[in-house]
Image: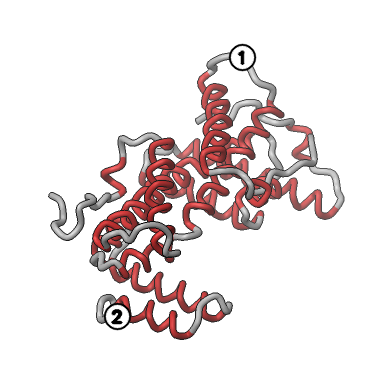
């Protein structure tokens, strides 16, 4: 059902499930451009109702895209650690502190174990990865040998 | 291991499409490795792919969300109902109100918004969500 006050359909993020990421980026760019042009008084005046639709479209598409990015974020963090990436580099890539990455990754594993079917063993593997990464970080900071180095780097992340 | 660390700020000059292409290319390499598709990649390569997925994804999210509250202001200015804005950002209306006030307060305290504009933003919320 289209809202009568705007000619552009209200786009709930849930309505965008079928769109590809490329389509979402292009739609966001088109909506955001219209809103930005109006904000800066560029071009022909656009009816407010149409601009409201563009603003809502920009918000909905950016929400859908960021939801998808967040969805993959901790899976990829787990993979990065499993492939031997230092915690400090993972943190730099995420603009977080290493301690935040460790706690957020554990929280993600807890949440998936509780609500999304992650097995206790898989959760335990995530915890072990975090523990090993934190150990390595501590040893590097203290300039001491890391006993875990003898274990080598796991070659497979295993989803 | 290379000392190079890709940070989201290193990607400031990339377009949204370039960020998305980079994100998807590196993610595909991880997914292929996970499922044993294609050539076996060295662990160091996959480690770099994973870090680049994280950096590209973060840069993409940063870019998309940078204008979020300004766009909420635009939507309300053009008379979009608060409930529609809330639906678009996946929040409850009172969460949008609180988020918008918090953003306006931060903008004001950092000198990025005039007191008059701050009042206008608050006025957009009217009695809703207060």
Q: Closer to the camera, B23 or A108?
A: B23
Judge the density around disc 2: few (<14), some (14-19), many (≥20) Cα neighbours within 10 Å: few
Nearer to me, A109 or A68:
A68
| SS class, disc 1 | loop
Badge 2 or badge 1: first in the primary sequence: 1
Up the image or down, A29 lies above or below B69; here it is above
Q: Quadrant of residue B40?
A: top right
Give the residue drawn at x 24%, y 52%. Answer: A10
Up the image or down, A130 lies above or below B103; here it is above
Can residue A125 be seen in the rendering of this structure? no
Question: Left or right: where does residue A97 sit relative to residue A65?
Answer: right
Question: Disc 1: which chain?
Answer: B
Classify residue A107 as left or right of residue A67: right
Disc 2 and disc 1: Cα gap in Å? 58 Å
Q: Label 1, on which residue?
A: B39
Q: Give the crowd class for mark 1: few <14, some 14-19, many >=20 residues within 10 Å.
A: few
In percent of width and height, residue A79 lies at: 58, 35
Residue of label 2: B130
**Going 65% across and 57% down the picture, which residue do you hit?**
A97
**Residue A35 location, quadrant:** bottom left
As helix, strand or loop, the secondary structure at mark 2 comes to: loop
Query: Which quarter of the figure has residue B95?
Result: bottom left
Q: Camera-side residue: A82 or A91?
A: A91
Q: How many marks?
A: 2
Between residue A100 and residue A143, name the one nearer to us. Answer: A100
- Chain at tag 2: B
Q: Position of residue A75 (x, y in %)?
A: 51, 39
Relative to B108, B7 lies left or right: right
Q: Tell me, for residue A43, which label it has, or none.
A: none
């Amino acid at each position: 059902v289209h809202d009568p006050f705007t000619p552009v359909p209200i786009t709930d993020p849930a309505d965008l499930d079928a769109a590809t990421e490329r389509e979402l980026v292009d739609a966001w760019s088109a909506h955001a451009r219209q809103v930005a042009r109006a904000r800066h008084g560029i071009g022909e005046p656009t009816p407010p109702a149409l601009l409201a639709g563009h603003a809502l479209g920009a918000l909905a598409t950016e929400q859908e895209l960021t939801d998808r990015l967040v969805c993959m974020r901790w899976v990829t963090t787990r993979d990065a650690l499993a492939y031997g990436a230092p915690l400090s580099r993972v943190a730099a890539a995420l603009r977080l502190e290493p301690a935040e990455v460790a706690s957020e990754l554990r929280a993600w594993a807890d949440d998936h174990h509780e609500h999304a079917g992650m097995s206790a063993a898989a959760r335990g593997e995530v915890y072990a990865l975090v523990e090993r990464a934190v150990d390595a970080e501590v040893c590097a900071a203290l300039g001491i040998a890391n006993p875990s180095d003898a274990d080598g780097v796991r070659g497979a992340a295993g989803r | 291991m290379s000392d190079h660390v890709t940070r989201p700020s290193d990607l400031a000059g990339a377009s949204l499409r370039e960020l998305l292409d980079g994100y998807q290319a590196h993610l595909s390499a991880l997914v292929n490795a996970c499922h044993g598709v294609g050539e076996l990649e060295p662990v160091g390569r996959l480690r770099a792919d994973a870090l680049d997925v994280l950096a590209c994804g973060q840069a993409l999210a940063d870019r998309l969300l940078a204008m979020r509250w300004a766009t909420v202001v635009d939507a309300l200015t053009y008379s979009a109902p608060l409930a529609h804005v809330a639906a678009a950002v996946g929040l409850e209306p009172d969460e949008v109100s609180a988020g918008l006030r918090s953003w306006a307060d931060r903008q004001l305290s950092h000198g990025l918004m005039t007191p008059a504009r701050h009042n206008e933003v608050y006025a957009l919320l009217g009695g809703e969500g207060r």
